[in-house]
Image (spheres, helix red, strand yellow):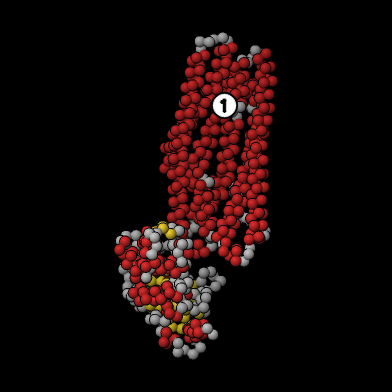
Amino acid sequence: MATVIRQLDDEQLERPFNKKLFRRLLKYMQPYKKQVFMALGLMSAATVAALANTYLMSRAVGYLQNKDFTAVPFVLLGMVAASVTAMLCTRKRIRLMDTSGRRAIAKLREDLFKHIQGQSFSFFDTRSAGKLLVRVINDVNSLNDLFSNGIVNVLIECLTLVLLVGIMLAISWKLTLVALCILPVLALSVFKLKRMIRVRWLTNSIKSSTMNGYLHETLSGMRITQAFTREEFNSKTFRTVNNEVKRSWIKAVQLSTAFGPTLDLVGSIGTVLVYIFGVKFIRADTLALADMLAILWYVGRFWEPINAISDFYNQILTASANMERIFEIMDTVSEIQDKPGASELPPIQGRVTFDDVVFGYNAEKTVLNKVSFDIMPGQTVALVGPTGAGKSTVVNLISRFYDVTGGSVSIDGHDVRDVKLDSLRRQMSVMMQDSFIFSGTIMDNIRYGRLDATDEEVIQAAKTVYAHDFIMAMEKGYDTVVNERGSMLSQGQRQLISFARALLSDPKILILDEATSSIDTHTEMLIQKAIGALLKGRTSFVIAHRLSTIRNADLIMVVSGGNITERGTHEELIKLEGGHYRGLCEAQYRFMAGD
C-alpha cells in the first residue's frame, strides 16, 4: 500500500534563489514597465497619504488637548482627503498590476505551450502528460502573485519602513529607539512563522494532489477494479491517503492560527515599552502626549511591511522551484527541428527511399541496422514482423518523428533532414492504432487536419470510409459533440472517424500504423471495401497483423532483427519454406479454423 500512495510529485518545495532565472522571468514584464512605474508612483502616493493620515490623527489629539478647536475641522478634512487619496491610488494600482501581471503570465504560458508542441517524440517518451500539465498550469499560475503584487509591493513596503522610521525619528528619536527594539524580534517571528506555514500548506497541497491523482486513476479504471474485486483494498488505500490530507491540513491550520496571536504578543511588548518610556519622557516635559500616541500608532504598523517582505521572500523561494521547472522545459532543445537553410519540400509524388538507415532510441540498443528499400509513388507497402522489431520505427522515420542515426531517408530524392518539417508533414497523413478523438463535434474532428475543408468535403470523406451511416444515425449527425478521446463512440467508430480525417487531408503518403487492429468484423468489412479508394494514387505504408489488410499490398516487407529479412508480394512470400510471413499466414489460418 505504501507504494500505491507514494507522493506523485517528488519535486522540491523550494530551491535557492536563482538571480539569472529571475532576471529572465522579469523580461516578461518588460513590455509593461510603464505600468509598473505608474503603479510604483501610485503606491508611493498611497503610502505617504496613509502615513500622513496617522500623523494628522495625532495632531488632532494635540489640538484637542490644548483646546484649540478651530484647527480640528481642518485636520479632519485633511484626514478624509488622505484616506480618499490612499484608497483611489491603491485601487488604480491593483487594476494596473493585475492586468499587466495576467498578460505577462499569459505570454509565458503561450511560449511554454508553443515550445512543448515543437518538441520531438523523444521528449514525450521521457515525460508524462501529467507533469507537463503541471508545468503549463500550476507552475505558471504560481508566479501570478509575484507578477501582480509581489515585486511592486516589496518595493513599496521597504519605502514604508523607511518613511515610518524617518517620521518617528523626527517626532522623538529617543522613543523611536525604544520602539525599534522590537523590530528584530518582530521580523524574526514573522519570517520564521511564515516559512513554516508556507511549507505546511505546500505539504498539504502535495498530499491533496496525491489524493486527487489516486481518485482519478481509480475512477478511470473502475471496470477493472470491479472485475478484480479490488473495491475493499482501494477503499483502505483511499482512507489512508485521505487521512494524510486531513493530518497535514490540521497541522497547517494550527500553525496558521498561531501567527496572529504571536504577532499580537510581540506587538504588545513593544507597546508596553513605548508606554513606559513615553510616560517617563512626558513627565520630564521632553515629549508631548500627541507625539507619544503617533509613535504608538506607527509601531502598530511595523508588522504590515515586515509581513509583506516576508511574503515576498517566501514567494521567491517557491517561485525559484517553479522557474527552474518551467525554464528547464523552455531550454530543452528539440532533437527534431529545421536545420539552418532548410528548404520547402515541393509537391511530392511519393517516392520513399531508405539508404542504409541505422537507428536506435538510445546508444545501447540499435533498432534498425542498415535498412534499405526504394518505394515507388503510388505503391502500397505492408510491414509485418514480431512485436518490437521496428515496424513503427520505419514509418516514424518517414514522418521524421525521429532522426536516423546513420544513413538517410529521402522523399522524391529530398533528404527529410534538409527540408522544413511542416512542408514535409503537410503532405503526409498518419493514422495510429490509438485513434485520438478531440472534444468537439464529429465535423470538427474530421476537419482537424484540413481546416479549410467544406462541409461537403468532410461528408464525402466520411462516406468514402463508410462512416457516414453511423454518424447520421446519431441525434445531431455531424454536429454531434463527442468528449475527449471519444468515450461515447465505439473503438471501430473512432477509427473510422480517424480514417476520414486522414483521407480528407489528401496526403501523397499515407501511413496506417495498426489502424485496423481493434475493428470488429463488420467494421473491417466496411474498411476493406474502402481501402482501395483510400490508397489509390498514394504511397501507403500499412502496419497490420490481419492478412485481409495486407495481402493485396504491392510489396510486403518482413522486419526482424533490425533489418528487412523478407520482401515480396503475398504470393511470393507464401512460397518461402520456413519464412516468417508464411508462418504468420499459417498461424492465422489455424486460428480462424479453430485449431
Residue shown at 50%/10% (left/top)? 70
Whether residue 329 is visible to the viewer of this picture, yes or no, is yes
Q: Quadrant of residue 113?
A: bottom left
Residue shown at 68%/24% (left/top)? 272
Quarter of the rendering occupied by the C terminus? bottom right
Q: Position of residue 442 (x, y in %)?
A: 39, 61
Residue 285 position (above or below residue 314) = above
| Left or right of 578 in this view: 551 | left
Please state which amino acid type lies under the numbered disc 1: Leu
Q: Could you tell me how many numbered marks the image carries? A: 1
Q: Nearer the viewer, residue 134 or 189?
A: 134
Q: Position of residue 582 (x, y in %)?
A: 48, 86
Residue shown at 43%/67% (left/top)? 493
Q: Nearer the viewer, residue 82 or 229?
A: 229
**What secondary structure is marked by label 1?**
helix
Quarter of the rendering occupied by the N terminus? bottom right
Residue shown at 46%/53% (left/top)? 112
Q: Quadrant of residue 448?
A: bottom left
Q: How packed is label 1: few (under 14 Cα within 10 Å), some, or many (20 or more)? A: many
Q: Nearer the viewer, residue 590 or 345?
A: 590
The residue where tag 1 is placed is 164
Whether residue 417 is visible to the viewer of this picture, yes or no, is no
Q: Nearer the viewer, residue 168 or 502?
A: 502
Q: Position of residue 480 (x, y in %)?
A: 39, 59
Q: Position of residue 404 (x, y in %)?
A: 46, 70
Residue 31 position (above or below residue 163) = below
